[in-house]
Amino acid sequence: MKKVAMIVAAAGLLMAGTAQASADLADKSGCNKCHAMDTKKMGPSYKDMGKKLKGAKAEDVVAKLKEGKGHPKQAQSDADLMTLTKWIQSL
């Protein structure tokens, strides 16, 4: 039982760290200039985007961001865009 509790606690800490890292990446990438967690700024909130993108393939979202379809063209790496997309979908 202790092992299960330790594994669950470790997974929770890892997920919390990933969420914070993704929020920091969004800030570093300039996403927060137009987006906020709960409120609409120039663009929709992260939570609203998360609801909209729930069933979408992350790879398709990244491709649209790289091409500039429906959003200004993004120059971040595919890995960073994938991390941000998956983070937003998890909200």
Image (cartoon, rainbow, N blue to C red):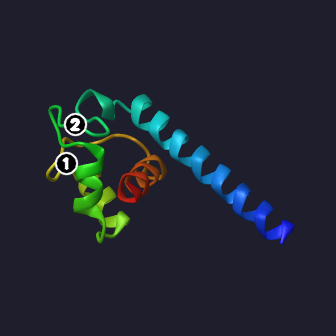
Three-letter amino acid code of the residue under disc 2 = Thr
Q: Answer with left or right where residue 68 lies relative to residue 58.
A: left
Residue position for label 1: 68
Relative to 21, say whether 78 is above or below.
below
Q: Is 13 or 88 nearer to us in this picture? A: 13
Q: Is 3 or 74 nearer to us in this picture? A: 3
Q: Which tag is nearer the camera, tag 2 or tag 1? A: 2
**Residue 71 drawn at (x, y percent):** 18, 46
- The first of marks 2 and 1 along the sequence is 2
Q: Secondary structure at mark 1?
A: loop
For residue 27, which quarter of the picture?
A: top left
Q: Answer with left or right where residue 46 lies relative to residue 24.
A: left
Q: Answer with left or right where residue 18 lies relative to residue 82.
A: right
Asked if the residue under mark 1 is in contact with the one under mark 2, i.e. CB atoms within 8 Å, the reply is no
Neighbourhood count class around disc 1 (C-alpha, 10 Å): few under 14, some 14–19, many 20 upward: few
Three-letter amino acid code of the residue under disc 1 = Gly
* Label 2, label 1: how far apart the Cα atoms are: 23 Å
Residue position for label 2: 39
For residue 46, which quarter of the picture?
A: top left
